Image (cartoon, helix red, strand yellow):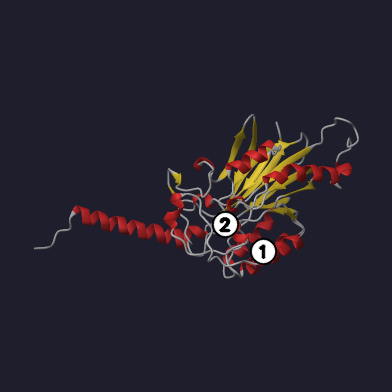
Amino acid sequence: MAARTSPGAALLVAAGALGAAALAWGTLVERNRFTVREADFPVLPAGAEPIRILHVSDLHMAPWQHRKQAWVAALAELEPDLVVDTGDNLGHVRGIEGIRAAFATFRGIPGVFVNGSNDYWGPVLKNPLAYFRGPSKGNKRAPQLDTQALLGEFAELGWLDLNNRAGSIVVKGTHLEFFGVDDPHKALDRLDLIASAIDDEREDDPLGDETWPDAHTPGAPRPTVTIGVAHAPYRRVLDSFVNHGAQVLFAGHTHGGQVCVPGFGALVTNCDIPRSQVKGPSLWRHGLRAAYLNVSAGLGTSIYAPVRFACPPEVSLITLTPAP
């Protein structure tokens, strides 16, 4: 007589097979399904030309990730007017090699950037269940990364360093004013410096008179779009940015949850942003003000957790358009 399999045992076998299939999909297929998410933010002055912003984040680059490097390099064919990089570019002690290859095609395209924690310290093996206890903590075993080489690479590209700083660029005739902070996840942000940094930028802005005909007319409003940039979208940071007049906000860090449940979404955010805003465009409200927010789900993963599920790696192409 043939042995019978109990319903419980059959269910366990089926669950194990489904889990194995999901793991294979997440590690072998989905983490390499690089995508471009597009959205429009209507914030420009009337009559202004649209501005295409390529938002990249969380590459977590290792030197052997040639497919990812080639895909990022090809993004220059989208002809963005500006690049916004929200950090965690490095994912290995030799990650700068991959970053150089990925961004070589972007020379001549203006950009801005901030750092994430993985631009300072490399990844270490972690228990993934620890993320359910709250945002990840530091690890004394984490290797130090070549942050200065990364800053030097971005300087050669001509990109503005917004780590606790402000700056401005004129793009297609529109004056864009930026301010940003160093990584809030590791408490490197100095929100107390934003107001003075903005004041100093507005006082010393060498682009002022040539883009603002009424610069010396008392009370004349300047046609400027103000943009806040951070790696990790903690509430305190987004609220502060809105208080300082930001109309558009860019962040990364969350990986969109990285492993999501279809129909439910992200299980964790690795910060205190609501799950509903863990990735993609949304509206961030604080007090009586609001700003357009884009949180990138990022392009990479830790080399110790190379899996994504129901959350493909992405960059964003955000088009600023005239407000109605």
Residue 60, horizontal then vertical, whole percent:
58, 61
- Count neighbours of disc 2 (C-alpha within 10 A) and say few if under 14, some if 14 to 19, many if 20 or more: many
SS at mark 1 in the image: helix
At label 1, which amino acid type do we have? Thr
Residue 244, horizontal then vertical, whole percent:
71, 38
Closer to us: 185 or 179? 185
- Please report whichever mark, 2 or 1, sits nearer to the chain's N-terminal start: 1
Label at residue 147: 1
Say whether residue 41 is visible. Answer: no
Closer to us: 302 or 120? 120
At label 2, which amino acid type do we have? Leu
Label at residue 299: 2
Q: Nearer the viewer, mark 2 or mark 1?
A: 1
Q: Does residue 166 appear left or right of residue 216 in this picture?
A: left
Q: Does residue 200 appear left or right of residue 95 in this picture?
A: right
Residue 205, horizontal then vertical, whole percent:
84, 46
- Quadrant where the C terminus sits is top right
Label at residue 66: none
